[in-house]
Image: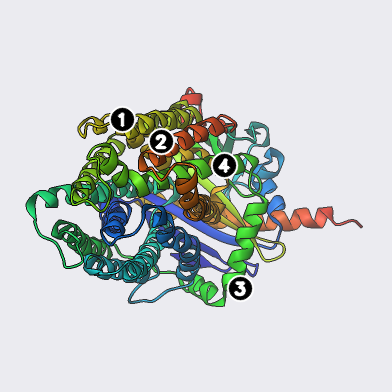
Amino acid sequence: MTANVMVVVERQYDYPRPEVFRAWTVPEELAQWRGSPGWHVETETVTSELKLGGRHHHVKVRDNDPTTRVTTDAVFTEYFEPDVFVARQRITGDPGIDPDAPLELRVEFTKMGRDGTLVRIVQGPYDPTVAGYHSKGWELELDRLETYLARRRVREVPR
Amino acid sequence: MTTTQPATAHITIVRQKPLMTMRQILLMNFGFFGIQYSFGMQQTAVNPIYSFLGASPEDLPLLNLAGPVTGLLIQPIIGALSDRTWSPRWGRRKPYFLIGAIGCSICLFLFPFVAAIWTAVLLLWILDASNNTAMEPYRAFIADKLPPSQLAKGFLAQSFFTGFGITLANISLFVFQNLITGATSAGIPYWVVGSFMLGAVCSIGTVLVSILTTPEIPPSEEELAALRARKGGFIAALREIWDAIAEMPGELRKLALVYLFQWYAMVCYWQYVSLSIAESVYGVGPDDPRYADAVSWTGLVNGWYNIVTFCVAFPLVALARRRGAKWVHIFCLLCAAVGLVVFANLTNQYLLFIPIIGLGIAWASIMGVPYIMAVRMIPSTRYGVYMGIINMMIVIPMLIQTLTFGWIYENVLGADPTNAIMFAGILLAVAALTMTWIKEPPIVRDVDDVMQMPAGAH
């Protein structure tokens, strides 16, 4: 099969763009929510040069099997805070993704109303047989982002 | 497409967009060929028609007022309207480029039969409005259909058909002159009529091919609801444009200055090239019967520079991506500057094809290279509004040219069309000089270039 499907996932958040953008890009923050349920990001593996041409690296590990590891290496080909970032990715360790065929991950942050943000993810190309699985993965991951943003907001509220 | 309703009020929308094959991309863009044929006729054949009808050379800029004004007004309005349109039967963008193409075809059909300057002016306004109605939603159509990673390919295909359409329009003028004789009662040669008829057929024919072979992506229920709930309309669009201008990066402002000189120059060239060739090569003015030969030869010269554009466009874009857009564009503008100064002083009709190569190279660069730089200055989430602003950076210089050049031509250039062409060359050199002021954003290399495959989801 040829990898020829782009996955597009959209979700609105009731948080301003800078907050949501930070959650996606700052290593300490993204390590707290990235990964589908049953997976987590190893905090110490995350490195990210937040600029055009900057490199990014992180490793995801299965919660119940630390030997199952998926590594992402990327370069930012576009980086405009808080509007959008685009990264060319090489993903290794995922049986559904060819490590020799780079993927593109594009995340757009559109202002919605006063303090809302629409996040649009475009990633691929995927083999059609695994595109649905990865779409579902993003869907669940975005739920985790919602939970993380709510948790962070509660922490930041002065008592 | 699937949707989920988690604990929060907002739903997640998931879509899968298949990548398009090159054949599908070409078919989708084929309609652009017909629209650009129409634009090519406007560039090369409309001014000679004014001259055939007895217009003075110094009046040509004002008679062309339709181009910049409709470009400035129609494109943003149609763009905003099509964003808010959806019909299960007709789609979102298709109604606009179908209506635009029908308008183009009717105007192209009627144009050669005009008998007075005022009817030609009126038809040019309708033709220009139709061209813009078709063109703006066509660009949005590409963005709707293609995922971001294929957009560059889609727009390159559009550039390909732009060059092809304009080239064919120009060459048809030369070919038909050698095949068709006679003239209408208003003095417009039948070979000009032939080129317009071909344009009328191409315009609607190619758009129909694209419409029938390329389905639009229907919006989901959620998108449709959002579309219907969308408020603000024209005022909101104006506000968005205003915000984008206020937040425009400094380097893009400098690019606006480059655009002022280069587009002013290009319009001078298009308006006066046939008069210049008539004077320098044939030694005649627009009242002389041999002016028709100059018009036909202009078609061939313009066709040739568009062929050059065609041949160098892809390598230039590749070079600009590798070496940087700034110096590539400066070099191309200087080629045209030297070319036009030499061109205006030649008396041999065959030698004209050598210096005009410079303009062909610059035209290829103008159509593509500054965009390579511009897209690295602006977030892609705001491409729509910034592309509209870049369009303004094109049409405003055209408007300024329209309002000022008649006076300059009369009082500074001695009402000499060859001076107008040299003036265009000098302005292109000034544009190149202004370009040196821009600080180009860094060139981003690919993941493969910067990584040596380290051991190493979403």
If you read the primary sequence from the N terminus, does the residue marked by circle 3 or circle 2 appear first?
Answer: 3
**Residue type beneath disc 1:** Pro
Q: Secondary structure at mark 1?
A: loop
Percent x, y for residue B302? 27, 43
Percent x, y for residue B367? 40, 43
If you read the primary sequence from the N terminus, does the residue marked by circle 3 or circle 1 appear first?
Answer: 3
Q: Estimate the spatial distance between the alpha carbons at disc 3 and disc 4, rounded to whole Å.
A: 32 Å
- Disc 3 designates what residue? B232
Q: Chain of mark 1?
A: B
| Colour treatment of the image | rainbow
- Disc 2 designates what residue? B422
Badge 1: how crowded within 10 Å, few (<14), some, or many (20+)?
Answer: many
Q: Secondary structure at mark 2?
A: helix
**Residue type beneath disc 2:** Met
Foreground: disc 3 or disc 1? 1
Q: Chain of mark 4?
A: B
**Vertically, is B184 above or below A47?**
below
